[in-house]
Amino acid sequence: MKAIIAGLILATSLSSLASQNASIVKVFDGTNATCKTSQDAYRYKLQAHLVKQAKYEINGDNLELDLKATMLSCDKTETGYSFSKANLFDTFTYQVLMSVDENGEAVFSTVEVSTNEAEVVLFDNKTYQKVVSIESKNNSTKTTEYSASVALDKVLNASELEKFNAGEEVQKTLDLFLKRNINVENGELNMRYTQSYGAFRLKLKLKK
């Protein structure tokens, strides 16, 4: 069985007989990322994460997963603000207000952000047990591709696996997020920490 999952925040796959586009719903607060104002630009100063496509397929006792994702940078343009695609590992900058000078003008400092490593983590949204983590590969494109083969006994619990092996359809929901380890630097600051992006929800219908 093969189905296609696609969407910004929630991806849902249906039967083995047809592939469908997914609904777009954010997991946590019900809203999608927007880039229309300077407030949005600051809110997403560390970028946003977009899952462009996800596919899955049952192969014997394994679940084969393939994801395509990109980062989104919220930038000022000639006509306002808009998102543009960005490479996960490209260095980028943002401005922070430091002070106000004697003329009442704002003084800004440039912060530089670079990525050390990143991975996509998938977990069971009911038990919060990790199913698999997939390392992000550094490449020259704005699309990051992820592939993994996961044993079904890591995806399904004992009861679900019994139903699956008996030929029944099993509905399974997995959540995923991007975990990105970054350096944040300016003249007075040098920090390294992990930033999380997401989450996304994959609803799977699994059947032999």
Image: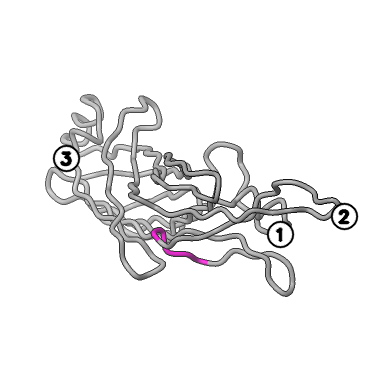
Q: Which mark is residue 157?
A: none
Residue 127 on the magenta span? no
As helix, strand or loop, the secondary structure at mark 3 comes to strand
Q: Kindly identify which residue carries mark 3.
A: 151
Q: Kindly identify which residue carries mark 1.
A: 36
> Quarter holding the N terminus?
bottom left
**Amino acid marked by disc 3:** Ala
Mark 3 crowd level (few <14, some 14–19, many ≥20, 10 Å Cα): some
**Amino acid marked by disc 2:** Asn
Magenta extent: 85-89
Residue 102, above or below 133: below
The percent coordinates of residue 57 (x first, y second) are 24, 53
Q: Kindly identify which residue carries mark 2.
A: 103
> Quarter holding the C terminus?
top left
Residue 88 on the magenta span? yes
**Amino acid marked by disc 1:** Lys
- Residue drawn 65% across the image and 55% down it: 41
The percent coordinates of residue 97 (x first, y second) are 70, 49
- Residue drawn 39% across the image and 55% down it: 5
